Amino acid sequence: MKKKFLNIAIIAITALLLFGCGKKEEAAEDPAKEAVKVEVKTTGPTIDAIKEKGKLVLGTSADFPPMEWTSFQSGKEEFTGVDIALAKAIADSLGVELEVKNMAFEGLLGSLKAGDVDIVLAGMGADEERKKQVDFSDEYSKGKQVLLVTEENKDKYKTFDDLNGKIIGTQLGSLQHKFATEKFGDNCKGFDLNNVIIEQLKNKSIDAAFLSELPAKQFASITDGFVIIEDLGIPDESGFAVAVKKGNDDLTAAVNEVVKGLKDSGQVEKWFDEYIELSNKEAMK
Ligand code: ARG
């Protein structure tokens, strides 16, 4: 009889511990934070080294809203955007801080190969040429490429071929630079920063800017007199993915886990909406 009572007591206490405490913890967690948290079980030499230094170093080129841009809203220079949020989630999953190194887009893969940065997120398309140099995670966004022109030229270019003889602005090291140079040679001008391309288009030093769709749309919505031309009869660019140094397979696997979790939960989509809106708002100020 006594034993039975003891058993019941043990069950009752266990239940209390399990459910009672479980509830409390749930209530204490911030649901917004919970959505972007992905546990990563993977370990290995690269991850151990990152944990040892206590930080994940991201290489990016912060001139590409909504993917990444430099914000001064808080009074100091800050990097923000979809890629920064995703990189932060990767750092969190490894239990380390995120350090952002901002540089020219063209230098990013060199820095990754040299080990100056651990990962690259920069609205970078995982194309075959780049895959020979570095590894990529699964894609977290599709890539389209479009033209940005000034209002008065909006009916001039129906297809990419109509740009023959025109001056096209592209970012150095980008897939757009490669594509347009192969087609039009020196008429394709390369610039380090997208902001400079935008200035060049404003003052009509170039006839069109050739960019990824989302940033082009962002620049069009925050600049008076800019129009997007889509459906140029050219293939899409490769989808965006996280670049990792070749051989750092444990890190690539961990990044893939995070990317999958955040895509499946709809968080990546949410970030796109959020950062498109934020970059519009900041530009209005
Ligand atoms: N999507 C293009 C590419 O992969 C351009 C990316 C430019 N990114 C940037 N952060 N500026 O080449």
Image (cartoon, grey):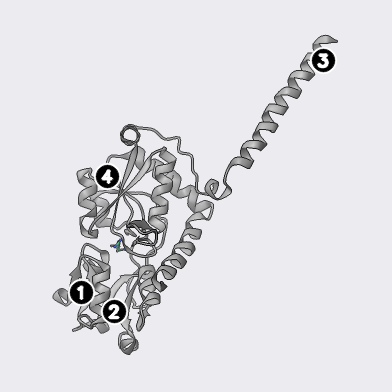
Q: Which sits earlier in the primary sequence, circle 3 or circle 2? A: 3
- Quadrant the N terminus occupies: top right
Give the residue at mark 1: 183
Secondary structure beneath label 1: helix
Tell me which image quadrant ligand 1 sits in: bottom left
Q: Is residue 140 above or below residue 221?
A: above
Q: Which sits earlier in the primary sequence, circle 4 or circle 2? A: 2
Residue positioned 37% across, 42% down in the render: 97
Which label belongs to residue 160? 2
Secondary structure beneath label 2: helix
- Amino acid type of the residue tagged 3 in the rendering: Phe
Rounded to the nearest angstrom, the CA distance separating label 1 from label 2 is: 9 Å
Secondary structure beneath label 4: loop
Q: Nearer the viewer, mark 3 or mark 2?
A: 3
- Amino acid type of the residue tagged 1 in the rendering: Lys
Circle 1 residues within 10 Å: few <14, some 14–19, many ≥20 = some
Q: Nearer the viewer, mark 4 or mark 1?
A: 4
Give the residue at mark 3: 5
Q: Residue furthest left?
A: 186
Rounded to the nearest angstrom, the CA distance separating label 4 from label 1 is: 31 Å
Rounded to the nearest angstrom, the CA distance separating label 3 from label 1 is: 85 Å
Q: Residue 207: horizontal and vertical position, in percent? A: 24, 82
Q: Which sits earlier in the primary sequence, circle 1 or circle 2? A: 2
Q: Are marks 4 and 1 in contact (CB under 8 Å)?
A: no
Q: Are marks 1 and 2 in contact (CB under 8 Å)?
A: yes
Q: Are marks 3 and 4 in contact (CB under 8 Å)?
A: no
Residue positioned 32% across, 73% down in the render: 234
Q: Nearer the viewer, residue 20 or 41?
A: 20
What is the quadrant of residue 70 in the picture?
A: bottom left
